[in-house]
Amino acid sequence: MNRNILEYLKRIQAMAKTGLTYSENPYDIERYEEMRDSTNELLAQLSNAPLETFKFHFEELDNDYPTPKVDVRGLVMKEGKILLIQEKTDQKWSMPGGWCDIGYSASENVVKEVFEEAGIRVKPVRILSVWDKAKQDHPHDIRYVYKINFLCEIVSGELNVGHEALDGGFFALDELPPLSEVRNTERQIMKLMELVESGELDWD
């Protein structure tokens, strides 16, 4: 099977799984189920393998060996201020970012997340930190999460908040709004700014 086709189908499967996880609308759920089933059928036809093989494979992914989730965040600066997005879930603020999607590298994910949440095109310059969320000063999370923070440069665009956020803005370090501490804390933001200056990489 062509590798590019396989990667596209894996991404469609991931979209279907995400939709089934978060959707509440019964019509949307039906569409995501159809997307999942159609992808299985297409994979079976392209590989001349039994349909049940692919149904089993994707069902097994849910029961596979547990591994950490990966969260990426972009530190985006403008005139000495950092970009923060107001989250819908808790009405508090965080650096733009989110869970990594299948089919994208970590750096591609952070570019996508910043654009979706803030409407700004960025270029990742370097990784600032790779942190184990359980070893940081976050509230307890039942999930095990690795957090990758990128320093990003603005390429183009103006702040235009997407549907996933309530508001956005650039803030001075001494004027930070209430932070969404499940995503990032004030101590972490200050540490990231130190890493920008020092050129170092920090990890747990």
Image: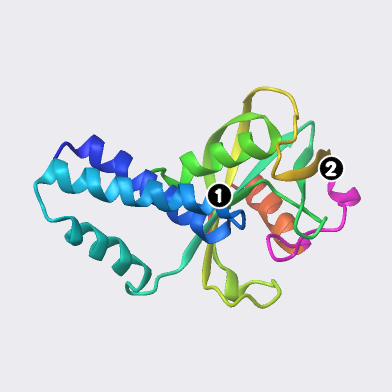
Which numbered dot is residue 27? 1
Type of the residue with mark 1:
Tyr
- SS at circle 1: helix
**What secondary structure is the stretch in magenta mostly built from?**
loop
In front of the other: 64 or 150:
64
In front of the other: 5 or 70:
5
Question: Relative to 175, does residue 118 appear above or below in the rendering?
Answer: above
Q: Is residue 8 left or right of residue 116?
A: left
Residue 183 drawn in magenta:
yes
Residue neighbourhood size for the residue with mark 1, other residues' Cα within 10 Å, grouped as few (<14), some (14–19), many (≥20): few
Which residue sits at x=63%, y=37%?
Answer: 116
The span from disc 2 to disc 1 (Cα, nearest Å) is: 41 Å
The magenta segment is 171-186
Type of the residue with mark 2:
Phe
Q: Nearer the viewer, mark 2 or mark 1?
A: 1
Q: Is residue 140 left or right of residue 99?
A: right
Residue 66 in percent (x, y) is at 39, 74
Which residue sits at x=20%, y=39%?
Answer: 3
- Give the tally of numbered discs: 2
Residue 136 drawn in magenta:
no
Label 2 vs 1, first from the N-terminus: 1
